[in-house]
Structures are given as C-alpha cells and as structure tokens.
Amino acid sequence: MSKLPPQYKFLDLSDYGRPGGKLIANALQETRFTPIHVTLLFVVSGFIAIYCIMNGYYIQAAFFLVLKSVIDAADGELARLKKTPSYVGRYLDSVCDLLLNLLFLISIMIVTDASAVVTFLAFIGLQLQGTLYNYYYVILRNNVDGDSTSRVRENTTPKALPGESQQAVNILYKTYISLYGIFDVIIYYLDKNAHRSKPFPSWFMTILSVYGLGFQLLIIAILLITGLEQWIIPTILIMSLFIPVFIGIRKLLLK
C-alpha cells in the first residue's frame, strides 16, 4: 500500500531502500515480528555502521548505512501489510533516526578531527533538511488523502490507535517533541502557509527528496568509500544552504 494515490507519486531519491524493505516486510508478514521489532533492527545496523566508522572500516560502514535505510523502509511497509498503523512506531522511528544521525556525525567528527562546533551546525542542518522534506511530504499526503499517520503539526498528543497503549504514545510523543520540536517549529514558521498550496508537483518533490534521510545516508556512504570522509560534514553544511531556496520556490511558484 502506497503513502500516496497513484497520480501523485513521485521519484523519491531517498527511498531507494523501498524494494528491499518490501521484500523484508513480505517475508515477515505472517510471522510474529512487528514493525517495532524491525525499527530496533535498523538501530542495530546503525550502531554497526558507527563501530565500522570508528575503526576505519569505511566500506563496511557504507554497507550498514545503506542497509539501515533498507530496514528503515521495512517497518512502515510491515505496518501497512499487517494493517497496524501506530503512533508508537511513528515516534520511535523518528527518535531513533535523530539519535543515530547525531552519533553518525560524532563518529565522523572523531575520525576526521572536525570541529565540534562545525559538526553541531552540520547536525542542525541535517535535521532541518529532513524536517523540510517531511513537512512538505506530509502536507502532500494530507492534501491528497494519502497516509495520515504523520501529521502536519505535531502540537497535540494523538489518541492511541487500536492495539497500542496510550501511555506509550504519550511517552514517545513527549520524547519526539523534546528532540524534534525546535526543528518542526523553525520549518513551520518559515513556511506556515504551505498547507494551503495546491498539491506539490512531482518534479519538486523529487528534487526535494535529496533531503530525505535515505539520500543523506547514501551521500555519507559514498564519501566514505571514496576516501572523502573529510568532506562529509562540509557537504551537509553546503546542502543546508539550499533550504531557503526550496522554501522560496514553494512560496513563489507553488502557491
């Protein structure tokens, strides 16, 4: 089941892991594995990647970064196959992504002797990139009756869906807000009227998808295996400079 109706689908450059994710989800559909189990599995892949980075095994690190993206696609696919949408899974996935992103950059900072301040700025940029992409993507899904588990603004605790605990939703929601809240607020106030626009065209979403986490990890993987690990943090900073460009395009051309 797709997150978007067929006529609004676009080439998502960050979603290269989807075919592999579907294979994993199909294999687990009739098992006791839940989407949350799969989320925890991509955390394991992320930690293996960090270990490999810290020890100079860059080819292996690249493999596990890409594998993390594949597994990351599988948890949502499994939830759709089992028809078990979950706010617990949605928030747990996002919290794990943010913490792993931070650890990825810290490990790269250590092996490249990068500045802690510059690394912190790169982390902020990385999160703002992902937030902008997710913000526009969620708006598109909401505007065309697509998947609605994610919300345009996460400013109220959602009611637990069937099969999940309200207490667990409350805890993970508060954790999500404490980690993501500032990024969501910044992007929202930079383009608070985006939800009033017509559905975003495919070309715009495809270009914007370079800000998706999967593509971000792919860039890191490529720079690792090509011996350009010193360029990972500067590349993230350079990509962040285009955030106002995307917002400007949306405001001027996609009203």
Image (tube, rainbow, N blue to C red):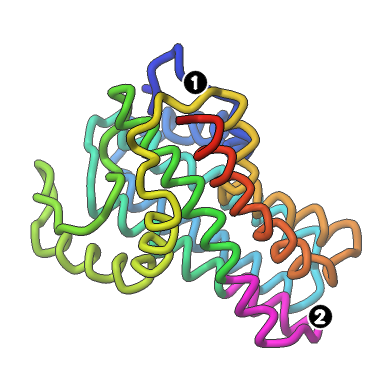
Measured along the vertical axis of the image, is residue 99 above or below residue 135?
below
Q: Residue furthest top?
A: 7
Crowd band around label 2 with a 10 angstrom C-alpha radius: few (<14), some (14–19), many (20+):
some
Give the main secondary structure, helix, strand or loop, of the magenta stretch.
helix
Tell me what residue is drawn at x 55 percent, y 31 percent. Answer: 253
Residue 42 or 180: which is nearer the viewer? 180
Q: Is residue 130 left or right of residue 216?
A: left
- Disc 2 element: helix
- Image location of residue 137, percent across then percent down: 44, 38
Q: Which residue is mark 1?
A: 9
- Image location of residue 53, percent across then percent down: 73, 72
How far apart are labels 2 and 1 at the CA level? 39 Å
Crowd band around label 1 with a 10 angstrom C-alpha radius: few (<14), some (14–19), many (20+):
some
Name which quarter of the figure residue 203 lies in: top right
For residue 112, which numbered disc appears in the image? 2
Q: Amino acid at mark 2?
A: Thr
